[in-house]
Amino acid sequence: MDTDRRSLLKGFAASAALTVIPAEAEARERKTAPKNAVGLLYDATKCIGCKACVVACKEANGLPPDTTGYGGGLYDAPQSLNASTKNIIQLYEEGNEHSFVKKQCMHCIDPGCVGACMLGALQKREYGIVTWDPDLCIGCRYCQMACPFNVPKFEWSKLNPKIVKCELCNHRLAEGKEPACSEVCPRKAVIFGEYHELLTEAHRRLAEHPDLYVPKVYGEHDLGGTQVLYLSHVPFEKLGFRFGTDQPVPETQQTVTHAVYKGFAAPLALYAVLGAVMFRNRKREGSEEEPPEDSN
Amino acid sequence: MHAHAQPIGGTLLNRPYKVILALATLGIALIVWRFAAGLGATTALSDGYPWGLWIAFDVVTGTALACGGYAMALLVYVFNKGRYHPLVRPAVLTSALGYSIAGLSVVIDVGRPWYIWRVPLYFWHWNLNSALLEVALCIMSYVFVLWIELSPAFLERWGTGEGKVARVSRAISPWLDKVLVWILALGVLLPTMHQSSLGSLIVLTGPKLNLLWNTAFLPLLFLISCLAMGYAAVVLESTLANWLFGRPMETKLLAKLERVAAWGMLGFVVLRLADLAWRGHFALALRADHYAVLFWLENLLMLSPFWAAFGPRGNPGRLFRGAMFLVLGGALFRFDTYLVAFNPGPGWHYFPSVQEIFVTLGLVALEIAIYIALVRQFPILGALPSRRPAEAVHQEERKWLNAS
């Protein structure tokens, strides 16, 4: 038997053991919305697509108009969320079926971006609002990779780029006002409120007009739940909500990471073993000759 | 320990070297441009594809190709296979360069690099859930560890003769020798940690990652593949260096390394297929789309060294091809996981810009340039048998250069 191969396969197995543990680990507990959580409830059946919320958002957050794709000083409303647009109304149309849909940060109950962020620049802070701290961000964009809604945007054209995303007008909340988008909405298609009250209100509307709605509150369970909730008369996947899973984005990765790194015990143990083995090998080196190489 | 390693000497600034330097210079110029004009103006990155070539290739694939130092340290220092000792120093040099270049790529890629120092120092802000934090801290430390692992080569060279440098070098050497074992242990621990974390890192992209690649076993798959790629990279690098400098081949040792790599990759493919079946997504591998094609291409390439490794001995060409295909397969697996399997949704596209491609090429060229300069000046490659004097080797080298 080739001793090299055998000992090396053992090596693969030993290193494997360190990462295999997660297979047996218990999944981490699902999170619930914080007690004082606030959010939005958007009802697509009420929205008339006036985009007053888009303009109000830009004003409230000091964001410039988006002129991408238009020349000669002419521009239309932005086409999607981008580094100068934290909130947008999009139109879905297919045959006779159409609907507007509002997009902004969903303020996930268990956000991928927060799990991703190295120094916690992105965090669920007061009221469960996901906010960004410029002092702790190195611009790695892992939050963008991790967000299932593609919400965080990066200022690609700037030399000191920031992450731009809806922070539920937390600067206005501090002044006792509500978010700009819900404040200006002429049809109350988007309303601001305490998360649990919004959820109750959504279910009340579903029960009152079952004929009007797809029987689902999007965000109640989706991707672990979001503090922005949606009601719609067209299926949610047609409005760009691609994922039907209830699993929070960070669940699998954190289950694996926690299993391996719990209390940092496994890495420390491995280091001690490696150090001891190498120390022993080095002591032997002087006294023992390497066995002669086998013939193959 | 490395009494047999010697600088190979010879002329540095020959024609191929000038070509390599030109490529490296172009890359550096483009890096300057990136900092002057911003990421948007120089890359094809977007809010849908925020990570591109620099992360998927330079960091995720590049550090795996630079796992020779890790793989050889495991073999020589942990499993005590002293006969592979001559292969350790060149492997550690390649690793030190590969990881340094990966670190440089991160600095170029992030948008606010002037805050990078806060990642290791703001420890009270550390998000211990972040796999990227773990990768970042591990890679930063590992770069230092690798250069310390390599430092005896520098001290040996500087420690000859008289003068201040020589005296200091000789004073450091015994002290370094004492602590080296604990550094070497770190040199095995850190890559075990961050190479597996590179797997868990991308698992966080969750539903955006194609199910052929997205599995909780990704950390293990990344760890196995980096070790196998590490051994294969040593085969490639050793064969290339010996051929380039007209030195005798270390075929016997390399054949053993390649067999280990091949077995590792067989384990990888078996685990991967079993996991796919267990997750109930095997049908995805049987579809006629580019995902399935890439999936099987990765697996086949990774298994390809079997014919070379177990075929007739003593053929460095076959060994080289086997290692090359294995490395290609492993590289494709990593590249695909971070780029091709990642789907941010309709409307997003990414193909690296010319600048991105030439920065990557430039950094690879820079790595090769420094490698050649260092092995000529410092005792890194194993010494030649005494019957082949250095002058004869340099003559062969010149012959090869004239022919090319």
Image (tube, grey):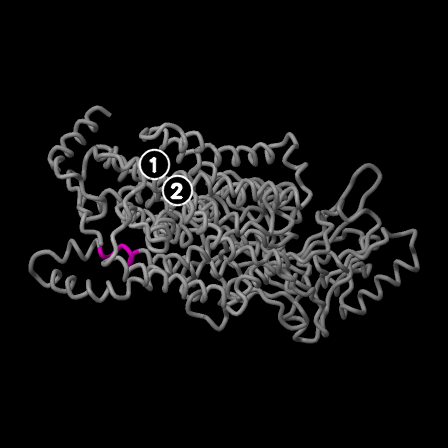
Residue A227, x across and y down, in percent? 72, 63
**Is B135 a magenta residue?**
no
Helix, strand or loop at mark 2: loop
Magenta stretch: give its range. B147-152
Q: Nearer the viewer, residue B139 or B181?
A: B181
Which residue is farthest top?
A: B403
| Magenta residues, dominant SS class | helix
Please state the chain letter of the residue tagged with numbered disc 1 in the rendered image.
A
Write down the residue under mark 2: A2
* Residue kind at label 2, given as amino acid type: Asp
Residue B158, x across and y down, in percent? 15, 56
Write down the residue under mark 1: A296
Helix, strand or loop at mark 1: loop
Residue B32 visible to an observer of this rendering: no
**Residue A197 picture quarter:** bottom right
- Judge whether A81 appears above or below A220 on screen: above
Q: Would residue B146 appear left or right of A205 to someone viewing this image?
A: left
Quadrant showing the N terminus of chain B: bottom left
